[in-house]
Amino acid sequence: MKVETIVQALGLEVKCCRDQLGKEVTGGYTGDLLSDVMGNSREGYIWITRQVHQNIVAVASLKEHAGIILINSSQPTDDTLEKARTEQIPIMVSDLPAFEISGKVFNLLTSKT
């Protein structure tokens, strides 16, 4: 499934890198502890987090994530958006809490298999 499909299905607000929404999503990971995400997420995952600082982009780039979803209407900092544009990592925002958006992403991904 493409990032764009998730954006449309869940009404996510795209904050940057709209041209990268064609990336393939192979799974997802929800977490705010960067070391946990680095150790347990995989390439192609969509990452769901409350963190908004630029280090999330560094982790997403390192792990080759398809994109980042920020929860609870959290807004990325300007330097986060700048780094995301450089690394070509889409950042989206949802007004939902982590539990709800994670369930919705999971349902979308598993309904296509």
Image (tube, helix red, strand yellow):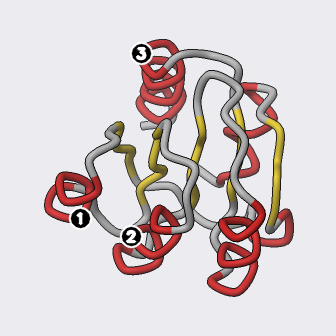
Q: Position of residue 40 (x, y in %)?
A: 17, 55
Q: Nearer the viewer, mark 2 or mark 3?
A: 2
111, above or below 17, in the image: above
- Write the residue at 56% across / 67% down: 54
How far is disc 2 from disc 3 in space, using C-alphas? 21 Å
How far is disc 1 from disc 3 in space, using C-alphas? 20 Å
- Looking at the rendered structure, the secondary structure element under dot 2 is helix
Q: Quadrant of the C terminus?
A: top left
Quadrant of the image occupied by residue 16: bottom right
- Looking at the rendered structure, the secondary structure element under dot 1 is helix
Question: Of the residues shown, which amino acid type is indicated by label 1?
Answer: Met
**Disc 2 + disc 3, Cβ < 8 Å:** no
For the residue carrying disc 2, how many other residues have a C-alpha within 10 Å: few (<14), some (14-19), or many (20+)? some
103, above or below 80, in the image: above
93, above or below 42, in the image: above
How far is disc 1 from disc 2 in space, using C-alphas? 6 Å
Compare marks 1 and 3 and give the one earlier in the sequence: 1
Residue pointed to by mark 2: 59
Compare marks 1 and 2 and give the one earlier in the sequence: 1
Residue pointed to by mark 1: 38
Q: Which mark is residue 99?
A: 3
Compare marks 2 and 3 and give the one earlier in the sequence: 2
- Closer-to-camera residue (85/41): 85
Quadrant of the image occupied by residue 87: bottom right
In screen coordinates, is 37 left or right of 87? Answer: left
Q: Position of residue 68 (x, y in %)?
A: 56, 52
Question: Of the residues shown, which amino acid type is indicated by label 2?
Answer: Val
- Looking at the rendered structure, the secondary structure element under dot 3 is helix
- Closer-to-camera residue (91/64): 91
**Disc 1 + disc 2, Cβ < 8 Å:** yes
In screen coordinates, is 47 left or right of 91? Answer: left
